[in-house]
Image (spheres, rainbow, N blue to C red):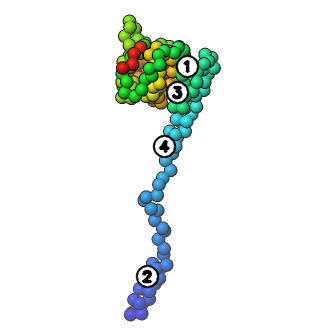
Amino acid sequence: MKNSYIFLILLTFLTTACHRTPPQIPSNTPEEDTVGMNLIEYNKLCQEDERREIEAYIDSVGGFTKSEDGFYYRVKGQGSRDKVKDGDLVAMAYSIELLDGTVCYQSTDGKALTFTVGKRQVIKGLDIAIVGHGIGDEIDFIFPYNMAYGIIGDRECITPMTPVLYRIKVISVK
């Protein structure tokens, strides 16, 4: 009887000792972010569509130059030599349009848009683009959506992810 207990213990030990547990998968292994990758790919496609839209507009009207900052500009009239710099208070007449010609906003009755350059009081593109221009300058700017009203638009006239055309005339710089 003693031998049968020993045999049973040995048999149990041998059957459990030979069984290996599978390796564990570490919980800190990064998983593939397919949602993030899809969003990045979608954004690239949107930017490419926007680039083609802007280029088609420029081809139809001509005269625009692409800046190093990513916006397009066309100087229609030169003014004074006093140039706008960061921190200046600028007043300007303006018109904001979509590339299909829809006028969304414009200054009327002599009311100018007034803002301090570099203080984020206007869209990013205009804040950057106005620097270096002077009183009396007339410029057209095309801003891609990431420098204009972004992925949500302005919820009134400018739809999400839409490039805009700013037509401006600098009235004063202080």
The residue pinned by badge 4 equals 36
Give the spatial CA distance, label 4 vs label 2. 51 Å
Residue, disc 2:
12
> Disc 4 or 2, which lies upstream in sequence?
2
What SS does tag 1 mark?
strand
Q: Which residue is mark 3?
A: 71
> Is 59 positioned to the left or the right of 79 in the image?
right
- Find the distance from the CA under tag 2 to the CA under tag 3: 77 Å
Image depth: mark 1 or mark 3 in front: 1
Residue at 48 percent across and 74 percent down: it is 20
Q: The disc labelled 3 sits on which kind of residue?
A: Phe
Disc 4 element: helix
Q: How busy is the neighbourhood of tag 3: few (under 14 within 10 Å), some, or many (20 plus)?
A: many
Above or below for 106 versus 39: above
Q: Residues within 10 Å of mark 1 (few under 14, many from 20)?
A: some
Q: Which residue is mark 1?
A: 74
> Label 3 vs label 4: CA separation?
27 Å
Discs 2/3, front:
3
The residue depicted at 48 percent of the width and 43 percent of the height is: 36
Residue nearest the observer in this picture, 158 or 174: 174
